[in-house]
Amino acid sequence: MAAAVDDGAGGLLQLVLDQERCDGNTFVRRLAAHHQRLGLGTMACRPEKISRWKKGRSRPDRRATIAMADMLGVPLDQAHALGWPHWLRLALRDDRALLASPWTPSGTVQALELVGGSADMERREFVITGGTLAALLASWAAASPATAVLSSNRRPLINDHTPASSRTASPPSDTWTIRLAPARHTRSPAPNAG
């Protein structure tokens, strides 16, 4: 038996299963059926297959990767470029909205509206996307200021969520993200270094 390697597949695969609203057995049956529809032949759909992928004991083979990427709507070239299990992030709808939006003021507002949702914020959702949001906010902090206009008649999301998020944050990364958002929102341009 191969030694287990913690490659992060367990967490990412579980997020995909949660998003698809199914357990591992259902997912592997769907994958086997999709595998067959694509003309890739039959695929064993034993329950331990997902368990081994999650634990890092094995990885999907080439044909299973083709079928899974197609089933989850991830371009195959990107799945190959990122490798297992990292390409699974592209299958997550919330992260995809942030990663695929154009780097323009209107694209930024649209991405935040897509992932921001309603004012009722579930703490676990904030923690899951906190790392992605922190990286995005850090790149925004380094960017030149620009003027953006809301693409809908809704009130600004950052102003709505920041106070609620501050009450539920657990240090250190959540707090850093919460502090960076209003700091960027109210930041004045830095003087030229010279």
Image (tube, rainbow, N blue to C red):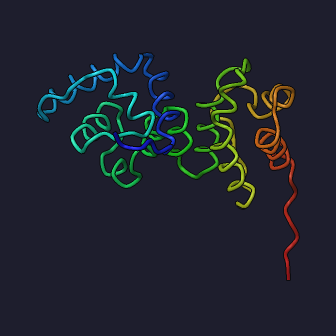
Q: Residue 68, image x and y in percent?
A: 30, 34
Picture quadrant of residue 72: top left
* Residue at the (81%, 33%) spot, across then down: 170
Q: Residue furthest bottom?
A: 194
Q: Residue 66, image x and y in percent?
A: 25, 40
Question: In the rendered view, would you say 94 is above or below 103?
Answer: above
* Residue at the (50%, 39%) spot, across then down: 96
Q: Nearer the viewer, residue 53 or 186?
A: 53
Picture quadrant of residue 3: top left
Q: Quadrant of the C terminus?
A: bottom right
Q: Residue 43, image x and y in percent?
A: 18, 29
Q: How many marks?
A: 0
Q: Is residue 68 left or right of residue 44?
A: right
Q: Is residue 69 left or right of residue 86?
A: left
* Residue at the (81%, 31%) spot, across then down: 169
Question: In the rendered view, would you say 19 is above or below 105?
Answer: above
Question: In the rendered view, would you say 26 is above or below 138?
Answer: above
* Residue at the (81%, 45%) spot, across then down: 176
Q: Quadrant of the N terminus?
A: top left
Q: Residue 94, image x and y in percent?
A: 55, 33
Question: In the rendered view, would you say 130 is above or below 27?
Answer: below
